[in-house]
Amino acid sequence: MDRERTPVHPHHRRHVGPHEMLLASTRTAAYIVDLAALLAMGYYIWRWPSTAGSAVGGLIGCVVAALNDSWEMIAQLDPTLNFPPIKAARVVVHDLLSLAVCVGGLMLLLFMDLRERREAEDPAYDRVSDWDTKRKVVMVAQWLVGAVAIMRLGFVLWIGCICSSERRRIVERRRRRQERRRTRRGPTERDESEARLAEMGIRVSR
């Protein structure tokens, strides 16, 4: 017997607006780039295992990016909260981690490619039959890892602005609550507070 799912109460559903759809579409595009980079580096590691260490950094960074993008892609469009969106500050941390690892992996790929190209300039260097193929695969991997890193930077700036705006709203709500509490206090209570402050030598201006 199939287990029936508990329906989600309408008040517990999350509104999916244009901002959520835009963020989900950009995360989808980033997820496709992540998968392409993973395929390129996976092929590079499988084809040339002797120099696979130069692709490990970029591979790990793209895995972190793909996990983050896939979750956010689904969470932003899910009104039932089965996939709750990660807090904005934590998303920024994940994107920063992926950005740092991807930049390190890109540097490793660039240095490895530069070293092999310099070695190939030596007349005594014996180029293998797939040398040109390796250069093309490395170039594709470099561009894709660079694209992943650029997208991470864009997401960090975007979500960082959201975090700052949310922080400003929280501070503003807190300030309004404090003002409402002050206005709800009776005049006698305010006079007693001002009298105590006057005894301490503090003058309150109205």
Image (cartoon, rainbow, N blue to C red):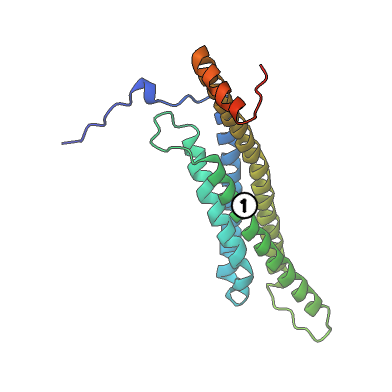
Tell which of 107 and 165 is nearer to you. Answer: 165
Q: Report the number of numbered marks.
A: 1
Q: Residue at x 57, y 22 (%)?
A: 195
Badge 1 amino acid: Leu
Tell which of 201 and 91 is nearer to you. Answer: 201
Give the farthest residue toward the front: 199
Q: Residue at x 51, y 40 (%)?
A: 87
Q: Read off the residue under disc 1.
A: 96
Relative vertical location of residue 63 with respect to residue 168 in this rendering, above or below: below
Mark 1 Cα within 10 Å, few/some/many (few <14, many 20+)? some
Residue 200 locus on image (x, y percent): 60, 31
Give the farthest residue toward the left: 1
Tell which of 37 and 156 is nearer to you. Answer: 156
- Quarter holding the N terminus? top left
Give the farthest residue toward the top: 187
Tell which of 89 and 44 is nearer to you. Answer: 89
**Can the viewer see residue 185 in this picture?**
no
Relative vertical location of residue 42 with respect to residue 171 in this rendering, above or below: below
Question: For numbered disc 1, what is the local secondary structure?
Answer: helix
Residue 109 locus on image (x, y percent): 69, 66
Residue 53 locus on image (x, y percent): 60, 72
Relative vertical location of residue 119 with respect to residue 71 in this rendering, above or below: below
Relative vertical location of residue 159 with respect to residue 58 in this rendering, above or below: above
* Res. 52 image quadrant: bottom right
- Quarter holding the C terminus? top right
Residue 73 locus on image (x, y percent): 51, 39
**Can the viewer see residue 1 in this picture?**
yes
